Image (cartoon, rainbow, N blue to C red):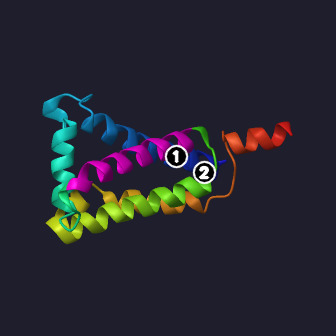
Amino acid sequence: MQEKIIKLFLRAAISLGFISAVADRLGYWPKDASTWYSWDVFLEYTALINPIVPESLISTLGTIATVLEVVFACCLIIGYKTELFAKLSGFLLLSFALTMTFSTGIKGVFDYSVLAASASAFALSIIKDKYFELDALLKKNN
């Protein structure tokens, strides 16, 4: 039972982290509690941590990252292909950590716990026990 609760906690924590970051860049969090507080500021940060990406592609890159975060969060919350989306989340977060490290240094990676989030996603991807997951419900009904 303990493993099931831990898996549920990891799913929620990773998903809510993604959703909070997306809400921040879309301006849903108050400005004084935000990192980006707007899409434009988020894109400026995206350009900062991706200096080799042409300016013309920054909006596309920011949009792709945002869509992936929303899709991964939704899939993890409902428990759809949890192991796959947890692994993809781990790689996405690791890519954030690497781009942050090589562009602005390691401090931001530590301050925002990006490596811890990435490691948590990878840990979630190896927990096979199903608990409150769409996959298990669908399999049970077939």
Instruction: Identify the element where label 2 is drawn.
Output: helix
Quadrant the C terminus occupies? top right
Residue 43 shown in magenta: no
Residue 76 shown in magenta: yes
Residue tagged 2: 82
Whether residue 69 can be seen here: yes
Whether residue 35 can be seen here: no
Instruction: Identify the element where label 1 is drawn.
Output: helix
Residue tagged 1: 11
Q: Which mark is residue 56?
A: none
Percent position of residue 92, x then y: 41, 59
Magenta residues: mostly which secondary structure?
A: helix
Is disc 1 in contact with disc 2, using a CB cutoff of under 8 Å? yes
At 18% from the left and 34% from the top, the residue drawn is: 33
The region drawn magenta spans 56-77
- As measured in the structure, the alpha-carbon distance from the residue carrying label 1 to the one carrying label 2 is 8 Å
Percent position of residue 54, x then y: 21, 62
In the displayed structure image, the side of residue 79 where residue 55 appears, left or right: left
**Above-or-below relation of 87 to 77:** below
